[in-house]
Image (tube, rainbow, N blue to C red):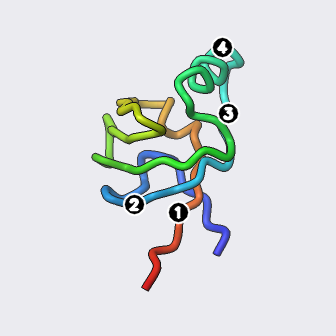
Amino acid sequence: MNTLLPLDMLPSGQWADVAEVTGEPSLVGRLAEMGVRAGCRLLMLQSGCPCMFQVGGCRLSLRGECCMQILVQPVPVAS
């Protein structure tokens, strides 16, 4: 399944792989410095706006357009 969602639409407790980060180059660069870049895996801790998620060993919180510019692909839950 190749469903891409904006980050703020990912349900709490769901893992996802970042597919794309769009927007102003300065924002994309800043997010990359914090570990949010295409190919990374993150865990949604609190969905919505603001959303809180974990990437690597860091917890980050974003709101507004920043969340919509990060497209993620949910990781299927193993049964």
Pinpoint residue 13: horizontal percent, then vertical percent. 32, 58
Check residue 22 in the rendering and tell me which mark sits there, or answer none.
Answer: 3
Q: Do the residues labelled 4 and 1 touch (CB within 8 Å)?
A: no
Q: Residue at x 35, y 33 (%)?
A: 59
- Which residue matches tag 1? 74
| Mark 3 neighbour density, 10 Å: few (under 14) some (14–19) many (20 or more) | few
Disc number lying in front (2 or 3): 2
- Which residue matches tag 4? 26
Disc number lying in front (3 or 1): 1
| Mark 4 neighbour density, 10 Å: few (under 14) some (14–19) many (20 or more) | few
Residue 66 lies, with reference to residue 73, above or below; the image says above
Marks 3 and 1, the one that precedes in the sequence: 3
Q: Specify the amino acid type for callout 1.
A: Pro
Residue at the far front: name it: 57
- Which residue matches tag 2? 14
The N terminus lies in which quarter of the figure?
bottom right
Q: Can residue 63 be seen in this view?
A: no
Which element carries disc 3, helix, strand or loop?
A: loop
Disc number lying in front (4 or 2): 2
The quarter of the picture where residue 62 lies is top left
Q: Are marks 3 and 1 in contact (CB under 8 Å)?
A: no
